[in-house]
Image: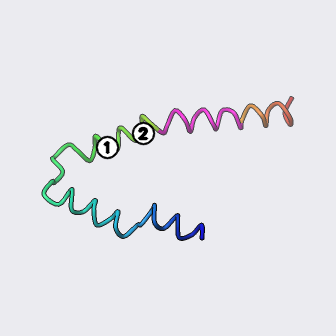
Amino acid sequence: MIKNRIFRILDVSKSEEDFRRRTAGESLEKGDLPAMIIAAFVTFLPTLLLLLGCFAFIIWLFFLR
């Protein structure tokens, strides 16, 4: 019952088909891929550094103090 609701909401094949239909005529320009990679680093790197810092602080607090 719950699986049917999830598949009804998140129909992967229908979503992929819709995405391909909407982006069929568009292509990436010359600088788009590096821009997306830089944007991903700017977005995820601070979060990763914060998490690693928290883990390092907890390890220091419990084991190395």
**Residue 53 tag number:** none
What residue is drawn where x is 74% and y is 31%? 57
Q: Amino acid at mark 1?
A: Met
Instruction: Check disc 1 and report its element: helix, strand or loop.
Output: helix
Q: Amino acid at mark 2?
A: Phe
What range of the chain is rendered magenta?
Answer: 44-55
Left or right side of 27 for 58: right
Q: Is residue 1 magenta?
A: no
Q: Position of residue 53 (x, y in %)?
A: 66, 32
What residue is drawn where x is 31% and y is 43%? 36
Q: Position of residue 5 (x, y in %)?
A: 52, 65
User: What residue would you read off at disc 2?
Assistant: 41
Between residue 8 and residue 31, name the one nearer to us: 8
User: What residue would you read off at disc 1?
Assistant: 36
Report how far apart the C-alphas of labels 2 and 1 lie in the structure.
9 Å
Hey, which residue is sitting farthest left in the picture?
25
Q: Main secondary structure of the magenta part?
A: helix
Count of numbered badges drawn on the protein: 2
Q: Are marks 2 and 1 in contact (CB under 8 Å)?
A: no
Left or right side of 54 for 38: left
What residue is drawn where x is 52% and y is 64%? 6
Query: Which quadrant would the C terminus be assigned to in this image?
Result: top right
Q: Residues within 10 Å of mark 1 (few under 14, many from 20)?
A: few
What residue is drawn where x is 44% and y is 36%? 43
Q: Position of residue 38 (x, y in %)?
A: 35, 39
Left or right side of 56 for 50: left
Q: Residues within 10 Å of mark 2 (few under 14, many from 20)?
A: few
Between residue 64 and residue 40, name the one nearer to us: 40
